[in-house]
């Protein structure tokens, strides 16, 4: 053993040691091939440096947070309440914001809080900031939560008059304030418990609800166009609002006369204004000023509810499709809670297994 015979053409058989036999080299492992197309490779060079590892995460952030950033940045000018905001708002709303201090205070608080919050949230969802500058992420988060909660208080103050203040509009404002406040509270509670995957879920939900204000602008425009074409939608408008629309800060006899001729039902037998009487106005986005206002008022509440349902569904769909990320973050939560010595690592926050009785276990112990 240890030798073998080899046939030689000149000398017949001769012995050869196994150690002298040249063995073929072992095959090298296959080199991984990046089968991504050129667009994906370019996109990775864009989103990898800011911490994103999945293209869909970057796309979701870019579309949603980018839209919020653009929307709020374009409305920084509205912080000039008496200037730009009053020039662009409906005359009926302007009446209440200029004559009643409560509503003026409410709209000022609301705009001064939600506009900067919408800008700051663009940076809150950038992974690189969470990984490399966690203290900035935390401080920014506290600031955003404080701004949104204060902004919600301002929204509740003006709900009775915003876009006509109808029951549908008031209910939509109350629902949005409740959903966002609850979601932010649960997100805060879970992060204090180091339940990171639940914190992520509730933050995504909160900003999905807050993003309703963007989407509903498009729905309102569509609704106003349909209302104008149908010509069968009417709304009661207070005479005090109609008079303000005609005068609009110009106390002229001609403006007052035009108002009285257009809406004689607002004047009593003595010639005095009946401020609390309501006149039916047709909604029309290409009619008179008061008719255009009604066209937008009629669509506001409907648009808010339609977009709220749409955003809520899309948020849950996204969370369901990213279950792997949820599980990964739960493992991170488990490790961090275990390092703290807590009794139920992986289950310290608000998790479903606290209710349905099926305790979650980490993958490595299953």
Image (cartoon, rainbow, N blue to C red):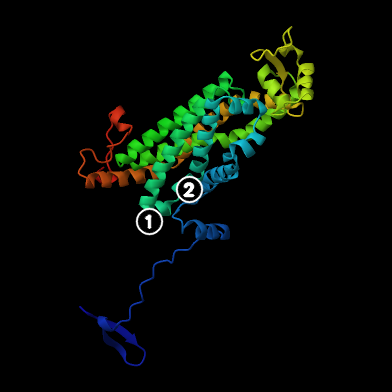
- Residue 161 in sight from this viewpoint: yes
Are there few (<14), some (14-19), or many (20+) residues within 10 Å of tag 2?
few
Q: Is residue 35 visible?
A: no
Q: Measuring from the top left, give residue 218's x and y in whole percent.
A: 64, 35
Secondary structure beneath disc 2? helix
On the image, the x and y values in percent for residue 51 come to 44, 55
- The residue drawn where x is 45% and y is 32% is 180
Rendered image quadrant of residue 256:
top right
Q: Residue furthest top?
A: 269
Mark 1, other Cα within 10 Å: few <14 / some 14–19 / many ≥20: few
* Secondary structure at numbered mark 1: helix
Residue at figure coordinates x 68%, y 31% from the top left: 222
Identify residue for label 1.
132
Q: Is residue 329 left or right of residue 81?
A: left
**Residue at image x 63%, y 38%?**
83
Q: Give the label on residue 335, or none.
A: none
Q: CA distance from mark 2 to mark 1?
A: 19 Å
Residue designated by label 2: 57
Mark 2 / mark 1, whichever is N-terminal: 2
Nearer to us in this view, 113 or 336: 113
Q: Nearer the viewer, residue 58 or 181?
A: 181
- Residue drawn at x 57%, y 28% as measured from the top left: 304
> With respect to residue 277, does 182 lie above or below?
below
Image quarter hosting the N terminus? bottom left
Q: Residue furthest bottom?
A: 10
- Name the one closer to the observer, 338 or 135: 135
Q: Does 255 sit left or right of 331 as displayed?
A: right
Q: Residue 158's quadrant in the figure?
A: top right
Is 268 on the left or on the right of 355, as rendered?
Answer: right
């Amino acid at each position: 053993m240890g030798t073998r015979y080899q046939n030689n053409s000149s000398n017949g058989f001769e012995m050869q040691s196994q150690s002298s036999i040249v063995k073929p080299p072992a095959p090298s492992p296959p080199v991984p091939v990046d089968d991504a197309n050129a667009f994906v490779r370019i996109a990775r060079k864009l989103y990898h440096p800011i911490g994103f590892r999945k293209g869909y995460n970057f796309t979701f952030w870019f579309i949603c947070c980018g839209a919020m950033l653009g929307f709020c940045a374009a409305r920084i000018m509205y912080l000039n309440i008496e200037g730009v905001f009053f020039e662009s708002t409906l005359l009926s709303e302007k009446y209440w914001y200029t004559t009643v201090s409560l509503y003026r205070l409410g709209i000022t608080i609301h705009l001064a809080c939600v506009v900067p919050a919408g800008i700051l949230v663009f940076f809150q969802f950038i992974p690189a900031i969470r990984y490399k500058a966690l203290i900035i992420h935390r401080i920014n988060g506290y600031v955003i939560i404080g701004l949104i909660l204060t902004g919600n208080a301002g929204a509740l103050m003006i709900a009775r008059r915003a876009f006509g203040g109808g029951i549908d509009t008031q209910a939509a404002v109350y629902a949005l304030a409740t959903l966002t406040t609850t979601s932010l509270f649960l997100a805060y509670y879970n992060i204090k418990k180091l339940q990171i995957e639940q914190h992520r879920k509730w933050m995504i939900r909160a900003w999905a609800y807050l993003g309703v204000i963007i989407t509903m602008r498009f729905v309102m425009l569509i609704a106003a166009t349909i209302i104008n074409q149908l010509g069968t939608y009417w709304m009661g408008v207070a005479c005090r609002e109609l008079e303000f629309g005609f005068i609009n800060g110009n106390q002229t006899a001609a403006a007052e006369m035009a108002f009285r001729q257009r809406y004689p039902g607002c004047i009593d037998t003595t010639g005095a204004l009946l401020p609390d009487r309501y006149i039916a106005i047709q909604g029309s986005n290409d009619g008179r000023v008061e008719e255009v206002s009604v066209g937008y008022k009629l669509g506001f509440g409907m648009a808010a509810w339609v977009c709220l349902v749409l955003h809520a569904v899309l948020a849950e769909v996204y969370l369901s499709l990213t279950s792997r990320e949820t599980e990964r973050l739960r493992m991170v939560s488990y490790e961090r809670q275990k390092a703290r010595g807590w009794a139920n690592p992986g289950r310290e926050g608000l998790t479903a297994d606290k209710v349905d009785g099926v305790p979650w276990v980490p993958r490595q112990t299953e």
